[in-house]
Image (cartoon, coloured by chain):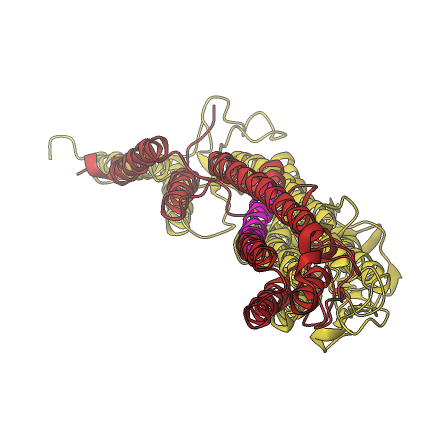
Chain colours: A red, B yellow
Amino acid sequence: MMRITEGSAARGSLASLQSSASRLAILQGQLSSGRLITKPSDSPSGTSTALQLRAELSRMGQYQNNASDGLGWLTSVDTTLGSATDRMHQVRTLVLQGLNTGANDATSNEALAQQVDAARSSLLSLANTPYMGRPIFGGTTAGANAFNADGTYAGDTATVSRTVAPNTEVQINSSGTAAFGPNGDNVFDLLSDIAAKLRTDPSALGPDLDKIDAAQLRLSGQQALGGARYQRVQATQTAAVTTTIALKSQLSELQDIDLPTTAIEMATADAAYQASLATTAKIRQISLLDYLR
Amino acid sequence: MSSTFAGLTNAMAAISAQRYGLDVTGQNVANADTPGYTRQRAELAGVGPVAGVPSIYATPHASGGVTVTGTSRLNDPVVDGRARAEHGRNGTLQTSASTLSNVESLFNEPSDTGLADQLNEFWNAWSPVANHPDDLTARGVALEKAAGLVGSLNASSAALDRLTQGVTAQLTDVTGKISTAAGALAKLNGAMVQATASGINTNALADQRDVLLMQLADLAGAQTANQPDGSVTVTLGGQTLVAGTTANTVAVDSSNQVSVGGNAATTAGGVLRSLRESLTTVLPAYAAKLDGVAAALANSVNGLQQGGYDLSGAPGGPLFTGTTAAGLNLAATDPAKLAASATPGGNLDGSIAVKLSDLGKSATGGDAAYRQFVTGLGADVQNVTQQAAVQQAVTGSVDELAQSAAGVNLDEETSALLTYQRAFQASSRVLSTVDEMLDTLINRTGKVGL
């Protein structure tokens, strides 16, 4: 039989007090931090997963930023191409007027020519529209303009894209030559030509109507393409929000405490601690000396 | 026929024996809380007829009273030996657990302030550079994040170094304590041998000796062997630490080799072993893994940077120099010099920056290396902490066993007190009864009728 001695009794009660108190302290820490995993040793595999989820979440946030940036660019492309189409409409009307007026009224033809010139410079400035300091139709050019004043293309043919989801890059730019036509045969050449014809021989304007229609078709084609890209980016952005929510709940499930469970465990641990305090206080007081006179 | 005054001598012997018993009980009660005290018991023996006496002088039926034959020390040497062995193991595991926890506390993961999060931010900072390669602010942010990473890795490495220095200091401290305890034990050995030879009570000396032996077990897992002359021989890692009155000093050289009295000691237990292992294998291994993180980060980033072109179209240079956590540094200071474009000519291509922002997903990059490092560290800490908890329980239960044999129980002492008190009172009564009888015999004999 094991002898119980003053030393072992003290040690035993101290040990059980210690273990109750440390259990209480662990639960207290979990409750106050709200976390199950506060250091890697709490759950090594959980830590590994948590680190991966956090990295994933952080990337998701960045994808959404990239998408917002891309949407801004695409909006700018859309409005610019819309305005360009409007200008072309105006030019078409001017050409029709020129055709109707014929070669009789040089003054009014000059006025029409000046309006076409104005439309050309307006189109040129539209083609050089910048988004955050960078011409949106210039590809990856470092220059300030996509088109020179003489209407030649100054940009490059490289694509500009945004990473909007894991391994998903969406092209967001429309090449200047695709939207406004290739060098030598673009809208600026066309408008210069029209203005010249208005001043010299308005009757030769007939074939230019078809050319204007073709240029308008190019512009609206690129606008439609931009719209499709806009929808695609927007769809991925919505998907990214859903994914982010899923990741967050996964991370929370992994590293956060279940409040009611922990609170109940805490209450149980507290009761155990109090019970061991009470019994220690009671038992350690009793001695044979109490019963001897 | 017994002597007329035998009753008086017997009663006197009984009185002094009971008083001695009371003294021992008093000693036990006084030391109920003294660490290392082992309870004692007065050994009493009845005195029978003296052997070898010629039959006419022999007293066949009477007895010679009681005598104190000694004072026993009521420990259990086997359990004490086990307790020392378990304490040696416990010392190793508890120290390892605390050292590893200290390492773990240097890496605050998973959190919003750890290195993992800084890595995430660094990779994310490349996306704005990819989106707007001409934006110097975005490039500046990427450079700032890189500087932050460098700072954190340098700081972690320095903190690990400081921890290593702390453990080295602890090791020096522990070897000093071992040498001191060994010196004290050698002195006690001398006293024990003398006291044993001259038959003096050695219990108090033995208590002091056991405390020192336990200390040596805790610190170094030292092995103990009792010698017939009352001394103990202590060996540490295959070398003699204490023999008789000679104690050797324990030292640790710059390569963390433990030597006893100048001879290399092979394996030691206790705190000493844990500290030595930490310095020779555990801490260098973590430092190497942290260096691996720095190297993976620098190599993956530099590789992409050197394959790209900066804002002016010139070929990119390395972003980091150095491949250790302590030696990692920034090579670039000009945001415009960061390579974002995959093609020369000074265009605004961002495909290198896109690749950089994707490096966080790489299985061979710094992130994966760091994640493995943290997870491995966590698993190590968990493993050692659990082992230490089990060993603590085992050590506690063996201590309990040793205490059960050697500890003082006040109830027991109180009842012994009562027994001795009653026996003392009864012996006094015997004395006075014999005295009355003698009084009758001496003073009343021949006075019948007077």
* Tally of marks: 0
Q: Is residue B324 left or right of residue B171?
A: right
In front of the other: A266 or A222: A222
| Residue A204 figure quarter | bottom right
Which residue shows up at 43% across the image and 40% down it?
A15
| Residue B381 is covered by the magenta coloring | no
Image x and y of residue B308, in percent: 83, 63
Specify the segment rendered in magenta: A50-78
Tell me if residue B239 comes above or below residue B164 in the rendering.
above
Is residue B205 in view from this perspective? no
Asked if the magenta segment contains residue A58, the reply would be yes
Residue found 58% across the figure and 65% down from its top? A119
Q: Is residue B357 above or below residue B151?
A: above
Residue A146: image x %, image y %?
70, 65
If the image is split into quadrants, where does the C terminus of chain B sit? top left
Decide if residue A207 is on the left or right side of residue A227: right
Depth check: give the residue in front, A258 or B284: A258
